[in-house]
Amino acid sequence: MSASRGGFSSRFGFIMAAAGSAVGLGNIWGFPTQTASNGGAAFVLVYLVLAFCLAYPAFMAELLIGRYGQANAVTSMQKMSRNLWQKRFAFIVGFSGIICAALILSFYGILAGWMMSYAIEPVTTTLGFNEASSWLTSQSIARNLIFSALFMMLTISIIRRGVEDGIEKWSKRLMPMLIGLLILLIIYVFTLDGSREGFAAYLNPDISRVFEPDLLINALGSAFFSLSLGTSVMVIYGSYISKKENLVTLGAQVTLIDVSIAFLAGLLIIPSMYVAQAQGVAIFSDDGSLISGPNLVFEVLPTLFDGMGGIGLFVGFGFFVLMSIAALTSSISMLEGPVSFIVERHNIERKKATTFVGLGIFIISTLIILNFDVLFGFVISLSTVYGQPLIAMLCCIFVGWIWQRSDVLAEIKQGNDNVEHGLFWKIWPWYTKFICPSAIAIVFFHSL
Ligand code: PHE
C-alpha cells in the first residue's frame, strides 16, 4: 500500500514540508501581531515555553499516529482501535480534524488572496496602472473572490501532483526562498532609523504580564495554530515518513524551525513599526496599545513602504511575496488532509478528489466573502479557538488511553534504536497521557 500512496523521498523533504505547513500566516502575521497586542516580550517568552512543553508533545502524538497507521487520519486512528466504540471515537476525532482543516483553509485562502493582491500592487504601481493599484488594495467582493480563487487554484495545482512531486518539491523550493527573503528584509529594516527602539520593545519582557490569563490563552492558541495541530495535517504528513527515520528528532527540528521563524518574523515586524513611527505613522491605538490585526499589515506597513520611495516598492513586493509563499506551503497541507481521506477511503483518483475538495472549500470561502461580517470571525473561532485545541486534546487522549502502550513504544523505537536511553522515552508517554490533555483542557475551559 505505501508504495502506491506515495511518501516523502528524503528527510530534508519531510522537514521542508512539515515546516512549510507549520510556518504560515500564523508565524509571520499572527505571532508578531499577538506579540504587539500582548505586551511584547512577555508574550514571546510564554509562547516559547508553551510551544515546547505542550505543542511539541501533541505534535509528536499526531506524527506518531500517522506513521503507525500509514494512512489518512481516520484510517490511522481506526487501526489503533480494538473495539467498535474505539473505532467510532477514532472516526469522530479523525474526521473532525479533516473538517477543521477544510474550514481553516476556507478563511485562510481569503487572507492569502489579500497577500497576493498586495504583492501585485507594487508591480501595477511601477507600470503606472494607478486604478488597478487602488482596486488591488481596497476591500471589494470582486477582488476577494478573484484572489481567493487564484490562490485556491495554486493550492489545487500542487496537491494534484501528489506527495513527492507536489508537496515535497514545492516545499523544498519555497521554504528556502521564504527564509532568505525574511532575513534580507530584517537586515534592511535594521539599517533604518527607529528600528533599535522596536528591537528593545520586542526583547524586554514585562515579567508581570506573564501569568495574565488572556496572554496564556492567546499564546497557547498561537502555538497550536502554528504547529497545525488538531487538523489531521500532521497525521497525514507523519504517514508519509519512512519508518527508518528518527521521528523524535525530526519533530523537534520542525518545532525549532517553526518557533525560530515566528521569532524572526517578530524581529521584522515590531522594529518595522517603530521605523514607521519615526516617519510619522501612528503605531499606537487610542488605548495606548500597539496597533495589531489587519491594520498593522495592510495600513501601517504599506505606509512605511510608501515612505521609503523607490526602494519601498521592492520591499513591499518582497514582504507580500513572503506572506504569499508562507500561506501556500501551509494551504497545501490543509488540502492534503481531506484529499487523502477521500482518495483512500472512497477510492477516488487523486486529481479528481483534489479538484472536487478544492472547489467545495472555495464555495465555503465564497459564502464567507459574501457574508463577511457574520461568517469570517465565526469560522475562525470555530476552527481555531474551539476546534484545534479540542481535537488536539482528543488525539493525546487517543494516544495515551486507547493506543496500546507496547505499540506506541515500538513506533517510537522505529528508526531510533537508542531512544530507550533518552528523556523522550521516559517522559513523553505519561506526559501525553496525563499532563497534555489536562493542561489543554484547563487552558481551554478557562478561555470559555
Ligand atoms: N500553521 C499554519 C500557520 O501558522 C496554519 C495551519 C493551521 C496550517 C492548520 C495547517 C493546518 O499559518
Image (spheres, rainbow, N blue to C red):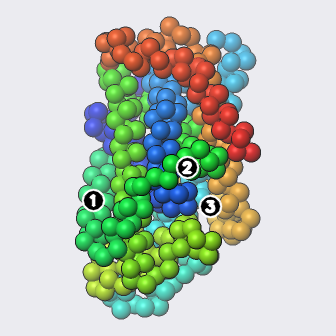
Kindly identify the residue that appears in the image at 30 percent across and 39 percent down. 13
| Dot 2 or dot 3, earlier in sequence | 2
What residue would you read off at disc 2? Answer: 208
Amino acid bearing label 1: Ile
Q: Nearer the viewer, mark 1 or mark 3?
A: 1
Instruction: Give how far across and how far down residue 96 sits, in percent.
Output: 66, 37
Instruction: Give how far across and how far down residue 190 sits, in percent.
Output: 28, 68
Please state the total of marks drawn on the protein image.
3
Instruction: Give how far across and how far down residue 277 sits, in percent.
Output: 43, 78
- Viewer-proximal residue among 318 and 359: 318
What residue would you read off at disc 3? Answer: 365
Kindly identify the residue that appears in the image at 42 percent across and 55 percent down. 204
| Dot 1 or dot 2, earlier in sequence | 1
Q: Residue furthest top?
A: 406
Query: Label 1's element?
Result: helix
Asked if the residue under mark 3 is in contact with the one under mark 1, i.e. CB atoms within 8 Å, the reply is: no
Quadrant for the C terminus, please: top right
- Residue 83 lies in quadrant: top right
What residue would you read off at disc 1? Answer: 183
**Residue 85 — which label?**
none
Instruction: Give how far across and how far down residue 165 sits, in percent.
Output: 33, 44
- Residue 319 lies in quadrant: bottom left
CA gap, disc 2 and disc 3 = 41 Å
Q: Is mark 1 within 8 Å of ligand 1?
A: no
Kindly identify the residue that appears in the image at 53 percent across and 73 percent down. 284
